[in-house]
Image (cartoon, grey):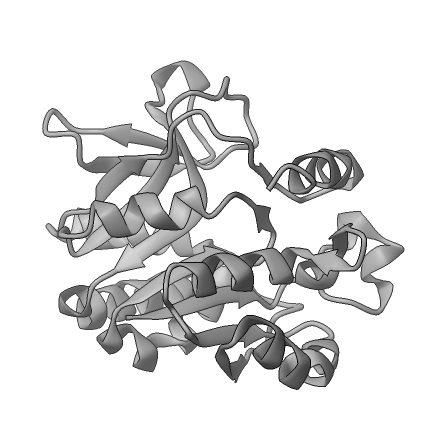
Amino acid sequence: MIGMVLAAGAGRRLRPYTDTLPKALVPVDGETTILDIALGNLSSVGLTEIVIVVGYCAGAVEERKAALEEKYGVSITLVHNDKAEEWNNAYSMWLAREHFARGVLMVNGDTVHPVSVERTLLDNRGPDILLAVDNVKRLADEEMKVILDDAGRLRRITKLMDPADAAGEYIGATLIEPAAADALADALKATWEADPDQYYEDGYQVYVDRGATIAVAPIGDVAWVEVDNHDDLEKARTIAKTY
C-alpha cells in the first residue's frame, strides 16, 4: 500500500497566500505546511511511497520534492493535472488511477488532521473502500456529508443534504484496496465525463449506485479542519500546534 495526496487545487479563497502557492503549501505552523502534515502522517504509519497529484503552481511542489523526500524518508511521484484550474477533483483523482492497484491511503491536500486518522483507517482495513468520517462534529451546509444504510455502509455522500439527515462528515481521507481499483477508476471517469466540475466524492456515489459498497470508519473526537478560507486557516494554525 502507498500514500496519496490530492494537491492540485488553487485555493482562491486563501489569497494572497495562494497567489504563488498551491493550497497544500500554505504554512500552518511556522514553516510547516498542510502538505508537510500529510506527508508526516503517511510516513508515520509506514507508507513511504507517496503519489502527489499536482496542478496549480505545481512548480512549487516540484522545487520542494527532494527536500520533502529527505525530511520524511519517503519517495514521491508527482502526477500532473493540466486541468486543475478548470476542472474539479474527480479528474485529479482519476489521473492517479494506475496507482490504485497497489492500494492507497489517500488524503486531501487541504485537510489538517492528526495521524490518528490514518491509524484508524489502517486498523479497520478490510473493506474495499473505507472512508474516515467525523460523526461528532456539528454539521452545516458546506460539509461533505454522508448517509449510511442499515448495515452502516455508505448510501449517499454529498454536500447537498439537510445536515439533520447526515450520519457525519467525510473528512477527506480514504483507504482504497486493490480490489476496488478498476471499478473506482471507471466510476471516477464516468463522473468527470458527465460533469468535469464534480467532486471525487461524486465518483464514490456512482461507485455505490452501481452496486459496490463503501464502508466508513469513525475517527472519534479529534481536532481537524478542511482549509478553505482564512477562518479555516486560523483554526488550522491553532490545531497544528497541538499535533
Q: Nearer the viewer, residue 188 or 124?
A: 124
One can see residue 123 in this view:
yes
Does residue 76 appear left or right of residue 127 in this picture?
right
Q: Position of residue 218 (x, y in %)?
A: 32, 32
> Among all residues in the image, which is located at the extreme top?
164
What residue is drawn where x is 79% and y is 40%? 230
Q: Position of residue 130 (x, y in %)?
A: 25, 48
The C terminus sits in image quarter: top right
User: Is 166 rendered above or below residue 72?
Assistant: above
Give the quadrant of residue 9: bottom right
One can see residue 205 in this view:
no
Does residue 180 appear left or right of residue 28 in this picture?
left
User: Is 18 rendered above or below residue 217?
Assistant: below
What residue is drawn where x is 57% and y is 48%? 111
What residue is drawn where x is 72% and y is 65%? 22
Q: Nearer the viewer, residue 195 or 107?
A: 107
Q: Nearer the viewer, residue 53 or 112?
A: 112
Does residue 63 appear left or right of residue 20 in this picture?
left
The N terminus sits in image quarter: bottom left
User: Is 224 rendered above or below residue 175?
Assistant: above
Does residue 25 appear left or right of residue 55 in this picture?
right
Q: Position of residue 145 (x, y in %)?
A: 41, 32
What residue is drawn where x is 46% and y is 48%? 115
User: Is 107 rendered above or below residue 124?
Assistant: below
